[in-house]
Every structure is written in C-alpha cells, then in structure tokens.
Amino acid sequence: MVSSLSSLQLFSMQYLPFTSKVDGIMLLKELEQLEHINDISITLRRDMPAQILFNSHKLQRSIVWLQLNCRWHVNKLQLPPYLQTLILQDCDDLEDVEINFEKEMVMIPSKFPGQQHFLHLLSVHIDGCRKLLNLNWLIHASKLQSLSIAKCEIRKVIEDKRMAMDSRNYRQLVDTTVEISNKVGVADIVGRIVEDLKDESEPYRRMVMETIETVVAKLGVSDIDARLEELLIDGSLYAFQEQTSDDDANYVMLNVFGAVVNALGQRVKP
C-alpha cells in the first residue's frame, strides 16, 4: 500500500506497459493521502484516473512528469502548474489543452510584461492526437527545450488575431511558430498560415508575414513546392499592397517581403 509510506515525497511510475494491471484509481487515491508527496511522475491509460488527477488540487501541484496513453476519451486537458514533461499518445478525443496558472506561477519578465508564463514545462511529446489542432498554449512555455509532434493535424498555430494587436504576445507567438516549424517542417506550417496573408486584419497579416519570413530565413524553402510558392508570393504581394498604416509599418513589410523573395531566389522568376 503506497498510502502506508507516510514520509514518501517522490513517486515515479513512467512508461507503464499496456499489459500492466495497476489500478490507476486506487493508486491516485493513495497518493493523494500522502502528506509530504510533492514529486509525482506517472503514466495514465484510462480517462477515469485522469479525472481523479485533474480534480485534485494536491495531485495537480505534485505532478512533474505526465504521460497519457490509452485512447483517452476526454476532449480537454488542463496541465498541472508545475509540470516539466508532458507525453500525449493516441489521445483520440483530445481537442484542447489549457494551462492551470496559479498565482505563484504568473511571472512578469521585462521582455513580455503582463504575460503569463508556464516556466516549468521543458519537454512536450505529442503523437497520434489527431483532433488536437491548436498549439497556441505552447507560447506560454517560455523554457521549453524539447518539442516532438507526430501523426497530428496541426492547423491552428497562430489562432487568436488579438495576439497581433498585443506587443506583449506578438514576438513570443512568432518565435513559437518558428520552433514548431523546426520540428514539423517549413512547408507544413507555412502551408497552414499562408492564406492568412489575405486576412482582413492588417496587424494580423503583418504578424503572419513576419512569421513566414522568420521561418524561411531560418529554415530555408527546400520543402516548399510550386503550388505553395505561388500562394506565398501572391499572399506576400497582397499583404504588402494592402498596407494602410504608418511608414514604419510599410518599411517593415517591405523588408519582410524582400527577405521572402531572397529566400526563394531564382524560383520567383517567371
């Protein structure tokens, strides 16, 4: 009985095999009874144990390593506030991830005043979560060191247009999108946001333009095919021509457009 270990502070049960007979419900209930537990690494394979975890304030504050892998039948996940490693595998119904910000977790670095940061999350692995379309929550993981994405339909990388109006989030959102591109490929990410170059919101168009420029400048255009290249040039021209803001913004857009053209090189010639 785990609950009989009254002084236990650290518990680890990682990469639990499918053949395991561990009773997740009983285990979580016993861990919750431990007064001094503050470091839990655990694999969960059923939605019922996961709900016990997410409904317990004590367990939420103690989880540092979490793997969900079991055809998980829950559509929303709230991350524990001190989580360091997250592994999501074959969570077929998972559609959204939220961060449980606690007062002591809300920090205000000078670079992004007023921005909430999920400072402990270092590693994220997502595999086979086909309904998880939105990775915007990763912009809060300012210390993220490792990101792995496989067999997922990532459609919403830049989702909230209000981000483009808020200088506190703008740069971090661009940087996060570049990092995701580094993991899943330039063509995949650029292909999902290139049509937003013709969005009705000028600040949003400018953010998408700068994001694409940063991605292609850093990672190149070798995997961009002829069709995507055509959409990119067409969208970039539209975004530049439709600028109505001040001269500084126009100068920025001109530089960004020039950088995209330079990255494509000979490919832009008719």
Image (cartoon, grey):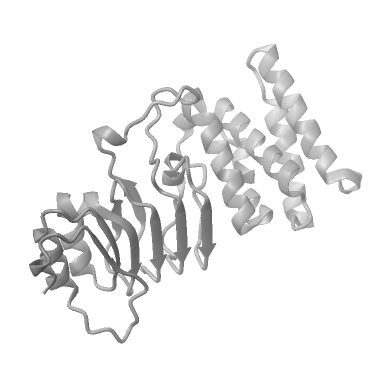
In the shown orientation, is residue 62 left or right of residue 240?
Answer: left
Vertical placement of 121 versus 45: above or below?
above
In the shown orientation, is residue 199 left or right of residue 112?
Answer: right
Residue appearing at x 65%, y 12% in the figure:
246
In this view, the residue in front, 171 or 256, is 171
Q: Position of residue 130 (x, y in %)?
A: 44, 65
- In the picture, residue 258 is in which quadrant? top right
The outermost residue toward the front is 7
Q: Quadrant of the N terminus?
A: bottom left
The outermost residue toward the top is 246
Total numbered labels: 0
In the shown orientation, is residue 187 left or right of residue 83?
Answer: right
The outermost residue toward the bottom is 19
Residue appearing at x 57%, y 44% in the figure:
177
Residue appearing at x 35%, y 65% in the figure:
67
Question: Is residue 215 in view from this perspective?
Answer: yes
- In the picture, residue 37 is in which quadrant? bottom left
Q: Position of residue 200 (x, y in %)?
A: 55, 31
Q: Position of residue 143 (x, y in %)?
A: 47, 43
Vertical placement of 137 versus 96: above or below?
above
Residue appearing at x 32%, y 32% in the figure:
106
In this view, the residue in front, 196 or 145, is 145
Question: Is residue 166 in view from this perspective?
Answer: no
Vertical placement of 194 versus 48: above or below?
above
